[in-house]
Image (cartoon, coloured by chain):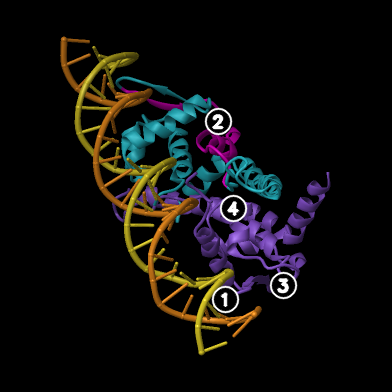
Chain colours: A cyan, B purple, C yellow, D orange
Amino acid sequence: MSVNTRFAVAVHSAGMIAFGERMVVTSENIAKSVGTNPVVVRRVCGMLVRAGLITVRKGQNGGALLTRPPSQITLGEIYRAVETGPALQVPESREGCSCPVGKIVGGVLRKFFCRAEDGMLQRLDRMKLADVIDAVLEEKQQ
Amino acid sequence: MSVNTRFAVAVHSAGMIAFGERMVVTSENIAKSVGTNPVVVRRVCGMLVRAGLITVRKGQNGGALLTRPPSQITLGEIYRAVETGPALQVPESREGCSCPVGKIVGGVLRKFFCRAEDGMLQRLDRMKLADVIDAVLEEKQQ
DNA sequence: CTGAAATGTAACCATACTGGTTACATTCAA
DNA sequence: TTGAATGTAACCAGTATGGTTACATTTCAG
């Protein structure tokens, strides 16, 4: 329970914010649905704001809105908005401490890992927020 | 410096172990090259042993050996050997605590995230340990 | 057979990241 | 003006990781 749920919270939040024009979506609403704390939601939404994916209105009857329709927002964009650094990391060999071959290996690994991670990002780029919403609505019908 | 360097250490180690027939590769050798501690290397190599990717001989003139040639070992196998749990996680909404819709969203997200992660795994499965070794040797020439 | 060299593993610590929580200033609408 | 909402700082707890020491165990060399 120590990793990486930020992305999930972000997608979940964005999915609810997609309905922001029909209902007021507050951090408290979202937190209830996600099963977490309003402050956590606000932290994540802050990153979405900084990435230009949503806008937030303070004050009474506040709430958030998407800046684009959910069919034009990809999970890749959300991922990049909230995730910092590569998923596959290479330890920074403390300078000079490791043998020269060790440094070469580190550089090579970084290249390989980047290519692998791109595979994940490309798939995320092909998934639209609207796809997630559709899947949820479909499951809800059943 | 808190995440995920296990995989990098594992690939680096396996790469050195590929030369185990021509030279004695000890955890201390590997640790020097990686820039870490022999115990850390042994911990990771233990997982590779359990996954059947290498064998280790204790005692004097010990060292490790690959169970297959490096052209038949993929980075995907190494990844699965040392990495536990999905890279993209969905918070387990504390049972009953979250609204029913929240649970549906969680399930949907898990599906989407799995598909995305598969993109990374498929690429890792196409990368052979031999490819890494070749790339390192090539860089070393220059 | 003995000793040196190597592994396997437990134990402990420091560090870092995350998420939960409280608190409070700020903003905005009714 | 007041209440509802956000933004953010601050602090805590839990967890994972990596570094380190220590020690039992294994295995080969001599």
Q: Is residue B128 left or right of residue D29?
A: right
10 Å crowding of disc 1: few (<14), some (14-19), many (20+): few
Q: In the structure shown, which secondary structural element does the residue marked by tag 4 occupy? A: helix
Q: Chain of mark 1?
A: B
Q: Could you tell me if the residues under marks 3 and 1 are in contact, i.e. CB atoms within 8 Å?
A: no
Q: Amino acid at mark 4?
A: Glu
Q: Is residue A38 above or below residue B111?
A: above
Distance CA(mark 3)–CA(mark 1): 23 Å
Chain at numbered mark 4 = B
> Residue A16 colored magenta?
no
At which x and y percent is residue A93? 59, 45
Instruction: Give the residue type that dot 1 points to.
Output: Gly
Most foreground residue, B7 or B57: B57
Q: Of label 3 and label 4, which has the lower sequence position?
A: 3
Which amino acid type is marked by label 2? Pro
Q: Which SS class for mark 3?
A: loop
Helix, strand or loop at mark 2: loop
Give the quadrant of residue A41.
top left
Q: CA distance from mark 2 to mark 4?
A: 25 Å
Q: Which chain letter goes with mark 3?
A: B
| Mark 3–mark 4 distance (CA, rounded to whole Å) | 26 Å
Q: Which mark is residue B68?
A: 3
Which residue is labeled 1 in the image?
B59
Instruction: Tell whether label 1 touches label 2 (CB within 8 Å).
Output: no
**Residue hosting label 2:** A69
User: On the picture, is A135 further left or further right than D3?
Assistant: right
Query: Visible in this render: residue B97?
Result: yes
* Residue B10 visible within the image: no
D28 vs C12: above or below: below
Query: Are the residues under badges 1 and 4 in a single subunit?
Result: yes
